[in-house]
Amino acid sequence: MSGHNEATGHAPHRNYVKIWAILMVLLVVSVVGPFAGIRVVTLITAFGIALVKAYMVAKNFMHLDVEKPIIQWLMAVALVLMVLLFYGVAPDVMKDRGRNWEKDAGFHPTVEAGHSGAAGADSGHATGSH
Amino acid sequence: MSFRTIATTRSAMGMPTGRLAIWWVLVSEVVIFGGVLVSYIMHRLAHPEWADQAAHTNLWIGAFNTFVLLTSSLSAVLAHQAAEQGNGPKAARFLFATIGGGAVFLIVKAFEWTSEITHGYTIQSGGFWSYYYTAAGIHATHVLAGMLIMIWVAMSALKNQDLHRVENIGIYWHFVDIVWIFLFPLLYIAK
């Protein structure tokens, strides 16, 4: 059942300034975290906190938590399709061994050089052109 | 004789068609941004050497723009609150503040891109830069589109007209904010 008021269609209002303040604290943590130089801490503070911030905005600002279930399902299905896209395509991009494909040198760092291809021109040019 | 658009008077699945439509738009936006971000993530994981290119993005500019967008989301939801209280002029003021936030975001981005391009980092400088300009460019286009629509909504709100649109454009704006919340660590922190 929707949390929007059935009579007025209005969403319940919250202390938005307080929510914004929490988002600001999370932003500071996500910026400071990587300076520790620890990979796990960087992953948690950057991407973990991004998930929390996105959840807070969707829940409190977009009122997704009190939206009609059909909307929540729509968004959930779209996100699941995004994950499916990753797992469907990732083997082609991230694996350098398998059947019926060959990657040019430079496409993947673990592939030994031996071929020259367009993909080989994909990396390192920025520093060269600087 | 006055006319009201169908979206303001009709409901489907228990909700106004205008709000339903904006959620459908966002579902398609998830596919657009999701495709770009997922594609970037898998390529970034497959190319650790892209870290050398990513090292040249400016963390502080990204952080400032995150601050700007999060703050503009606050003003957008406060506009929604004012609209539900029937205070159109107040909603319009908050919407104009949101538009200002979007303008600051785009101006900062323009200076940032100008600096990067003059240093030789163009969309053709490598895989990372291709994704960087594509993802941030599509996002900036959405910010601009949101600002233009918001001007139109705010002008109506000033006259206390079609206040339901304040919520609809707000939902869109928050989504654009969420996209940036993920672009920020992907493009500016992961190095």
Image (cartoon, coloured by chain):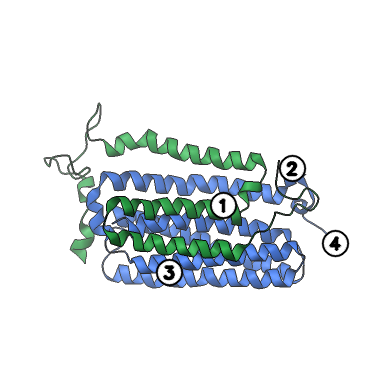
Which comes sooner in the sequence, label 3 or label 2? 2
Marks 3,1: beta carbons within 8 A: no
| Colour chain B is painted in | blue
Q: Which residue is mark 1?
A: A58
Q: Chain of mark 3?
A: B
Look at the image and give the colour of chain A: green
Of the numbered discs 4 and 3, the one sitting upstream in the chain is 4
**Which residue does the numbered mark 4 point to in the structure image?**
B2
Q: How far apart, in angstroms, are the residues tagged by discs 3 and 1?
A: 21 Å
SS type, badge 3: helix
Please tell me which residue lies in front, A122 or B17: B17
Q: Chain of mark 1?
A: A
Where is mark 2, residue-wise? B12
Comparing labels 3 and 2, the label whose residue is closer to the camera:
3
Front label number (2 vs 1): 1
Can you say which quadrant of the picture contains the C terminus of chain B?
A: bottom left
